[in-house]
RNA sequence: GUGGCCGUAGCUCAACGGUAGAGUCCCAGAUUGUGAUUCUGGUUGUUGCGGGUUCGAAUCCCGUCGGUCACCCCA
């Protein structure tokens, strides 16, 4: 019996590493004034199949089935449609702008590979009701804060910015229709991956060449990004962002700014991706709700891989995990006659908030110290025939001292952990 | 959905046509009030599964399932 392909079991060590990432997500979001929300794991399939929604690509990856009530349903492949649905339903109850985040599991039926699984956890942050560059900068600030909290620097990752409006403006100048422009953007997305001559053939009907597209990408559109860079610069974050118009992103609902976080090694995939979707809410609600919105998603898989493969980030994580062991205090029962006293002491420490463990059955002292060590405990407290006098050993330094049981709580509190 | 590589003990791997092994981990002891070393002993396998070739298959062939990497796409 194993887990299904592309699905993961999380044994305690793995769960701790996962929780380290999720805690970084949650903490960074709260530092930016975002509040946490969630929706259902299962949604109506229609939510993803509507026009202007995710796009046909994601439909092929849907984990969908018919439930016992003959409803066509799907495990959620992304958060934005659920979020949009919820915002449309109750947006009048909330002051704008909305700053919401979520940490949730998502499902996509695709071939598992490096950085890509069938179930993954994704952090999502969305800022709804403000279409200004200040809102863009706020979202980018959060996207940048997460890898920084994990120990990554400007040398490890970069935000690549692009803008669909800049592209649409350029393509309109070149005489492309809206429909034609949409097709060209799909080609831009493949610019780095497909050979130039086959792309030229695809571009010919639109009156363009690869050289034209490359020319626009190289020339850039600095005036387009000036207000955003000013915002970022005030926060001291401008160095983390760079304009790269070759990014257009696949999802159909993006309308303006789009961006990706990329690791500088480029061995891995995008760490995060997002953008502005100013018409999605209006489209989904038949114009009943019309709010500008921007958001991004950051997955746990690629980010976790990057932590694992970056020595300074891995050391930071391991130090953090060591500093928060499963057990802080281990009671060594050296004399079974004192077991009852040891249990009383255990309970007192636990009530005071310490993470405490002890042997459930009589065991050799050596075994008990081994168990303390294995659990990562900072202190071993020896309860023996000298009771109520205790011996307390700092496991890391092997230093030992004696003190009365009544003073243990205060003594532990005075330690630096 | 397409293609490359790989499935042997809980884990990492060896044996590559001739009786399935090592390290590690785990358990116990050496050590009856002290954990990272050392030493001793012990548990664990339908060699992923199914079929074929052969006197004989972990080994060669086919299929299948799984892993992994790349394409596609994306977190």
Image (tube, coloured by chain):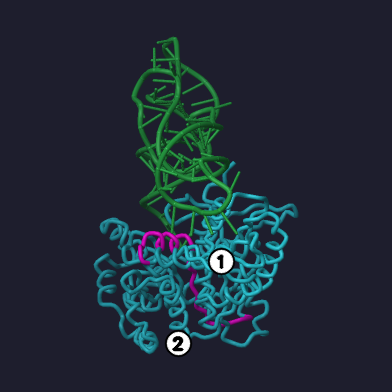
Chain colours: A cyan, B green
Left or right, A99 with respect to B20, comes to right
Q: Residue tagged by mark 2?
A: A134
User: How many angstroms separate mark 2 from mark 1 (CA)?
Assistant: 55 Å
Residue A84 visible at all = yes
Q: Nearer the viewer, residue A414 or B55?
A: A414
Residue A320 - label: none
Outermost residue to the front: A386
Residue A59 visible at all = no
| Chain identifier of the residue bearing label 2 in the image | A
Asked if badge 2 and badge 1 are on a common chain, one would say: yes
Q: On screen, B57 above or below A78?
A: above
Locate the N terminus of chain A and report the quarter of the image it occupies: top right
Q: Secondary structure at mark 2?
A: helix
Q: Residues within 10 Å of mark 1 (few under 14, many from 20)?
A: many
Left or right, A190 with respect to A415, comes to left
Q: Residue A303 in magenta?
A: yes
Q: Which residues are magenta?
A: A288-312
Q: Quarter of the image holding residue A290? A: bottom right
At horizontal 35% and vertical 87% (from top left) the residue drawn is A233
Report x, y in % for residue A329.
Answer: 58, 65
| Chain identifier of the residue bearing label 1 in the image | A
Q: On screen, A119 above or below A284?
A: above
At horizontal 71% and vertical 53% (from top left) the residue drawn is A67
State how many labels appear: 2
Q: Residue tagged by mark 1?
A: A392
């Amino acid at each position: 019996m194993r887990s299904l392909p592309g699905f993961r079991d999380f044994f305690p060590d793995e769960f701790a590493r996962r929780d380290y990432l999720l805690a970084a997500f949650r903490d960074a979001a709260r530092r930016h004034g975002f509040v946490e929300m969630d929706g259902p794991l299962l949604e109506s399939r229609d939510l993803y199949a509507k026009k202007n929604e995710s796009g046909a690509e994601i439909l092929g990856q849907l984990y969908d089935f018919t439930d016992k009530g003959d409803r066509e349903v799907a495990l959620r492949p992304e958060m934005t449609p659920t979020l949009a649905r919820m915002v449309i339903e109750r947006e009048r109850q909330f002051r704008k702008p909305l700053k919401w985040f979520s940490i949730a599991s998502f499902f996509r039926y695709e071939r598992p590979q490096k950085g890509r699984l069938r179930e993954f956890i994704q952090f999502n942050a969305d800022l709804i009701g403000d279409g200004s560059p200040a809102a863009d900068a706020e979202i980018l600030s959060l996207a940048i804060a997460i890898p920084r909290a994990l120990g990554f620097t400007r040398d490890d990752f970069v935000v690549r910015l692009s803008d669909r409006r800049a592209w649409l403006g350029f393509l309109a100048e070149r005489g492309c229709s809206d429909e034609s422009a949409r097709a060209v953007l799909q080609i831009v997305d493949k610019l780095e991956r497909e050979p130039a001559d086959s792309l030229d053939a695809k571009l010919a009907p639109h009156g363009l060449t690869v050289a034209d597209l490359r020319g626009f990408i190289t020339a850039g559109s600095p005036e387009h990004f000036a207000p955003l860079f000013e915002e970022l610069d005030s926060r001291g974050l401008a160095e983390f962002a760079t304009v790269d118009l070759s990014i257009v992103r696949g999802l159909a609902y993006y309308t303006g700014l789009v961006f990706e976080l990329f690791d500088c090694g480029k061995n891995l995939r995008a760490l995060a991706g997002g953008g502005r979707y100013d018409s999605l809410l209006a489209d989904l609600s038949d114009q009943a709700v019309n709010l500008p919105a921007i958001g991004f998603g950051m997955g746990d898989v690629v980010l976790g891989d990057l932590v694992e493969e970056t020595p300074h980030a891995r050391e930071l994580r391991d130090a953090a995990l060591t500093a928060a062991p499963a057990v802080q205090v281990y009671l060594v029962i050296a004399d079974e006659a004192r077991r009852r006293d040891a249990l009383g002491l255990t309970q007192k420490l636990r009530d005071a908030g310490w993470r405490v463990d002890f042997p459930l059955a009589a065991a050799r002292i050596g075994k008990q110290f081994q168990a303390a060590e294995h659990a990562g405990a900072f202190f071993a407290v020896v309860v023996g025939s000298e009771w109520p006098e205790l011996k307390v050993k700092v496991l890391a330094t092997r230093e030992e001292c004696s003190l009365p049981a009544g003073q243990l709580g205060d003594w532990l509190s005075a330690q630096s952990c």
